[in-house]
Image: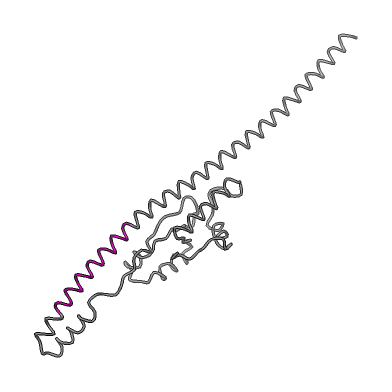
Amino acid sequence: MGSLKQLHGRLEDLHCKAKNLAETGLALTNLFAEEAGRLNRCDEASRLRKLCFSIRRQLDSVKSGEDAASCGYSQANLIVSLGGLAVGGMIKMASRSKQLSALADYLLKNPTDKECPFGLILICIGPRGLPDDAGVVSISQLARESSRPESEIINKLQEGGYLLFNEKTFSLLIDRLIDDVREGRLYLPISREKLSEITASGELNLDLRK
């Protein structure tokens, strides 16, 4: 009888230990899952930070291109303007012809072509959302190349389903998204529809020219 009691006691002890081990294993599994989730969120937040860094580099490059284009345009306009003034002045002084005089007046009054837009650069997010479908676009360059106003270019892109942000607003958006990702409220990829909801909330200033 004594040996049976001892065996029963050992079995109960083993059962208790097994139960404790199972509970410990479950707790460790949950802990590992939580840690894996945390690491995944940190990785996704890091991807957003890298995206922001990449966009800033693109912005710097496009800004340099716009500055160079604007400077070149101004210099060309100056040359045309000075040339037009000189030619117009000479024609005005040397000719008594009404037609030539009219041409001189035109050159004197209109030494340059119409103004071209420069410097409006925006971040564009396409249908696949973030982080895989974002880039920098010079609205001014597209307007110059197509001889259309910048507002028309913006409307065309928005009608095509693209979200447009200036540098400041995009930075605020990324900060917001990083916080949400780290807290587990959002996961990558972030759809264009979700981004539209966030921008429609009114928390971000969507004035594209500020």
Residue found at the very far left of the displayed protein:
94
**Left or right, 66 with reference to 94:** right
Task: Indicate the position of residue 83 as horizontal and vertical percent values.
Answer: 16, 74
Residue found at the very far right of the displayed protein:
1
Q: Residue at x 14, y 77 (%)?
A: 86
In the rendered image, the vertical position of residue 58 relative to residue 31, given as above or below: below
Q: Quadrant of the N terminus?
A: top right
Task: Indicate the position of residue 98 as horizontal and vertical percent values.
Answer: 15, 90
In the rendered image, the vertical position of residue 76 relative to residue 88, given as above or below: above
Q: Residue at x 25, y 63 (%)?
A: 72
So how many labels did they put on this image?
0
Q: Residue 6 is drawn in which quadrant? A: top right
Q: Residue 208 is drawn in which quadrant? A: bottom left
**71 inside magenta stretch:** yes
In the rendered image, the vertical position of residue 136 relative to residue 47, given as above or below: below
User: Which residues, given as a range, are shown in magenta?
Assistant: 64-87
Q: Residue 108 is drawn in which quadrant? A: bottom left
**Left or right, 141 with reference to 88:** right
**146 inside magenta stretch:** no
Task: Indicate the position of residue 142 as horizontal and vertical percent values.
Answer: 35, 65
Q: Quadrant of the C terminus?
A: bottom left
Is residue 135 or residue 174 the one in the foreground?
174
In the rendered image, the vertical position of residue 94 relative to residue 81, given as above or below: below
* Main secondary structure type of the part rendered in magenta: helix
Q: Residue at x 31, y 58 (%)?
A: 65
**Left or right, 91 with reference to 109:** left
Q: Residue at x 21, y 83 (%)?
A: 106
